[in-house]
Image (cartoon, rainbow, N blue to C red):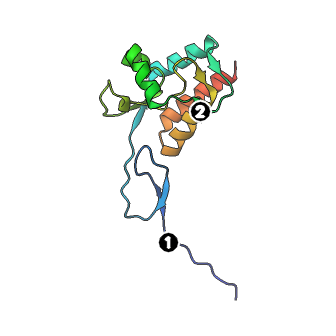
């Protein structure tokens, strides 16, 4: 008689916070994920940067993505609207003039980075933010078509 395989315990992928990685967890875990909408101003700004050839095609995103001190420095010299133009995701329910409102940065506050767009697509996909994922993907295709 053929040997029968048993199914492992049922698990599902859950997200504990917007900064955590997805984990396989038992059903008793609580799912807490921020909700995002697409920031049309950021999409327009990205297209403008691409049209003006203000982009970097090859970079190490983990080395050039803005750290908190770079974000703070940018905000000292620019408006919240200008800061938001670098973030294609807007956190639903967050106050407008807060860093928490803006997600998925795609540039270094001077130029758009192709790897920044790829990071946006990946992270939005990882967390299930389909509209932001597709907006970043469309921008990536627009850049690659240039």
> Going 64% across and 33% down the picture, which residue do you hit?
60
Q: Is residue 83 above or below residue 32?
A: above
Report x, y in % for residue 47: 57, 17
Residue 137, picture quadrant = top right
Is residue 64 something one can see in this rendering? yes
Which residue lies under the disc numbered 2? 63
Near-viewer residue (14 or 19): 19
Q: Is residue 144 left or right of residue 82?
A: right
Residue 120, picture quadrant = top right
Is residue 78 something one can see in this rendering? no
Image quarter hosting the C terminus = top right
Q: Residues within 10 Å of mark 2 (few under 14, many from 20)?
A: few
Near-viewer residue (67 or 7): 67
Give SS at disc 2.
helix
> Going 56% across and 13% down the picture, which residue do you hit?
48
Image quarter hosting the N terminus = bottom right
Q: Alpha-carbon distance for marks 1 and 2?
A: 40 Å
> Going 42% across and 31% down the picture, which residue do you hit?
37
Report x, y in % for residue 70: 47, 25
Nearer the N terminus, badge 1 or badge 2? 1
Give SS at disc 1.
loop
Report x, y in % for residue 9: 49, 71
Q: Is residue 86 above or below residue 10?
A: above
Q: Is residue 9 above or below residue 46?
A: below
Q: Residues within 10 Å of mark 1 (few under 14, many from 20)?
A: few
Q: Is residue 24 left or right of residue 146?
A: left
Which residue lies under the disc numbered 1? 9
Q: Are marks 1 and 2 in contact (CB under 8 Å)?
A: no
Report x, y in % for residue 55: 63, 19
Q: Is residue 128 left or right of residue 112?
A: left
> Going 58% across and 15% down the picture, which residue do you hit?
49
């Amino acid at each position: 008689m053929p040997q029968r395989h048993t199914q492992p315990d049922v698990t599902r992928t859950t997200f504990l916070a917007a900064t955590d990685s997805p984990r396989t967890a038992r059903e008793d875990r609580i799912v807490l994920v921020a909700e995002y909408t697409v920031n049309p101003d950021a999409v327009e700004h990205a297209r403008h940067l691409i049209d003006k050839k203000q982009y970097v095609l090859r970079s190490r995103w983990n080395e050039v993505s803005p750290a908190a001190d770079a974000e703070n420095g940018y905000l000292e010299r620019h408006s919240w609207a200008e800061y938001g133009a670098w973030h294609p995701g807007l956190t639903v329910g967050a106050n407008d003039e807060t860093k928490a409102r803006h997600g998925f940065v795609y540039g270094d506050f001077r130029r758009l980075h192709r790897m920044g767009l790829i990071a946006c697509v990946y992270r939005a996909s990882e967390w299930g933010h389909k509209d932001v994922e597709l907006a970043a993907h469309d921008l990536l295709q627009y850049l690659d078509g240039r």
